[in-house]
């Protein structure tokens, strides 16, 4: 009995003096583990008479639960202590400014992408997408550009052999235009349709304003009464918001695209000098995008009745927009992965483009 009282006292004292969670574990094992002191006492119960067993058993159980309780209380206390020490050591001052040098930059094309999505998103457009590797049906045929159509020569296409067919008409392409997403969207969705499709496009071309991979945004609106006037209003709102200038003259020149009729190219006013290009009022014009009313053949190819529905489409080059808006002279540099270039032309990651928070956040443009 005295032994046991002694065991209890020593154990409680040890628990009280324990300085970390690990030593508590050790104490627990030494008392209540398989070969622990208390376990040994429990084993001895078998040798006692029924009466003694009852008395002793009860006592041992009381001690056991007292020790368990002490262990638990101490454990909580030590946890809290360790946590407080950690918190005190690892304080973070959230009001400190960002360490600019270490956080990388957003590429101008990504920035333009965000801006375009923010503007059209506000107008109620959804973002659609399609594959980079296309079949000729989606990239050309359904866009009213059958094989041998002269317009196919307008684009220097990369073809990919179809392993399942020797027929050239079955070969794939890396899409030459995001217009392919018009077809994919109309195949899946019934009008009304209002989408933009930003993405990568590919053509065999390489100079200061052309790279084999570049980015376009396609726009498509289909409804019962969509008119050329709607097209003009929509694109005017877009360019004005995008270039963030108060006065921006625009004009539409008649043009040709197989998938639109009538087709047009939109120009914006600008002022060109030897060293500078200023977007806004001036005597010069700058071509900015292609557009038009969706050709009835395109609607038919997607199972949409051109007697009931009509719409407009447009396509513009994202990289070209970035070059114009941020004054970047050579497109090839966009894809050279030179961190010095990115540091110069890139944007701070936290300056998100939004219609309410400001588009390009020129303050974030690191120069
Ligand atoms: N796909 C055309 C190109 O790559 C751009 C374009 C022009 C898209 C007119 C359109 C459009 O949707 O209506 O040159």
Image (cartoon, rainbow, N blue to C red):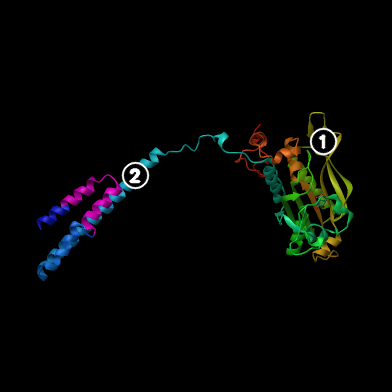
Residue 56: x and y in percent read: 13, 64
The stretch in magenta equals 9-33
Q: Tell which of 220 and 258 is nearer to you.
A: 258
Q: Tell which of 345 and 147 is nearer to you.
A: 147
Q: Is residue 310 visible?
A: no
Majority secondary structure of the magenta segment?
Answer: helix
* Position of the C terminus by quadrant: top right
Residue 344: x and y in percent read: 66, 33
* Position of the N terminus by quadrant: bottom left
The residue pinned by badge 1 equals: 270
Mark 1 vs mark 2, CA separation in Å: 66 Å
Residue 17: x and y in percent read: 23, 45
- The answer to whether residue 130 is above or below residue 317 is below
Circle 1 — which element?
A: strand
- The answer to whether residue 160 is above or below residue 321 is below
Residue farthest top in this picture = 274
Q: Look at the image and say whether residue 18 sits in the magenta stretch.
A: yes
Residue drawn where x is 26% and y is 51% of the image: 26
Circle 2 — which element?
A: helix
Q: Which mark is residue 82?
A: 2
Q: Look at the image and say whether residue 24 sits in the magenta stretch.
A: yes
- The answer to whether residue 242 is above or below residue 164 is above
Instruction: Kindly tell me whether mark 1's CB lies below 8 Å from ligand 1.
Output: no
């Amino acid at each position: 009995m005295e032994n046991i009282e002694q065991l209890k006292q020593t154990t409680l004292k040890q628990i009280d003096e324990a300085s970390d969670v690990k030593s508590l574990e050790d104490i627990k094992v030494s008392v209540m583990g398989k070969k622990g002191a208390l376990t040994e006492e429990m084993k001895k119960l078998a040798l006692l008479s029924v009466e003694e067993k009852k008395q002793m058993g009860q006592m041992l159980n009381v001690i056991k639960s007292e020790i368990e309780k002490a262990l638990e209380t101490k454990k909580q206390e030590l946890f809290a202590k360790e946590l407080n020490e950690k918190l005190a050591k690892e304080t973070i001052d959230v009001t400190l400014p960002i360490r600019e040098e270490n956080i990388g930059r957003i590429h101008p094309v990504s920035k333009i992408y965000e801006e375009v999505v923010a503007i059209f998103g506000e107008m109620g457009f959804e973002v659609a997408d399609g594959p980079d590797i296309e079949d000729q049906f989606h990239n050309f045929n359904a866009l009213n550009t059958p094989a041998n159509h002269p317009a196919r020569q307008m684009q220097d296409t990369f073809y990919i052999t179809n392993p399942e067919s020797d027929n050239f008409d079955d070969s794939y392409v890396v899409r030459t235009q995001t217009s392919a997403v018009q077809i994919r969207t109309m195949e899946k969705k019934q009008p009304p349709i209002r989408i933009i499709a930003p993405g990568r496009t590919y053509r065999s071309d390489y100079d200061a304003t052309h790279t084999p991979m570049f980015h376009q945004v396609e726009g498509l609106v289909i409804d019962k009464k969509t008119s050329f006037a709607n097209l003009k209003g929509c694109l005017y709102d877009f360019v004005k918001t995008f270039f963030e200038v108060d006065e921006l003259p625009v004009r539409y020149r008649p043009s040709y695209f197989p998938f639109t009729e009538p087709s047009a190219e939109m120009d914006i006013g600008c002022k060109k000098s030897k060293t500078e290009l200023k977007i806004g009022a001036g005597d010069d014009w700058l071509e900015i995008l292609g557009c038009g009313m969706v050709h009835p053949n395109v609607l038919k190819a997607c199972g949409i009745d051109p007697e009931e529905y009509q719409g407009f489409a447009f396509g513009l080059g994202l990289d070209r927009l970035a070059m114009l808006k941020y004054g970047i002279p050579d497109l090839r540099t966009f894809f050279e992965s030179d961190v010095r270039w990115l540091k110069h032309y890139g944007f701070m990651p936290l300056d998100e483009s939004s219609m309410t928070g400001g588009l390009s956040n020129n303050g974030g443009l690191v120069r």
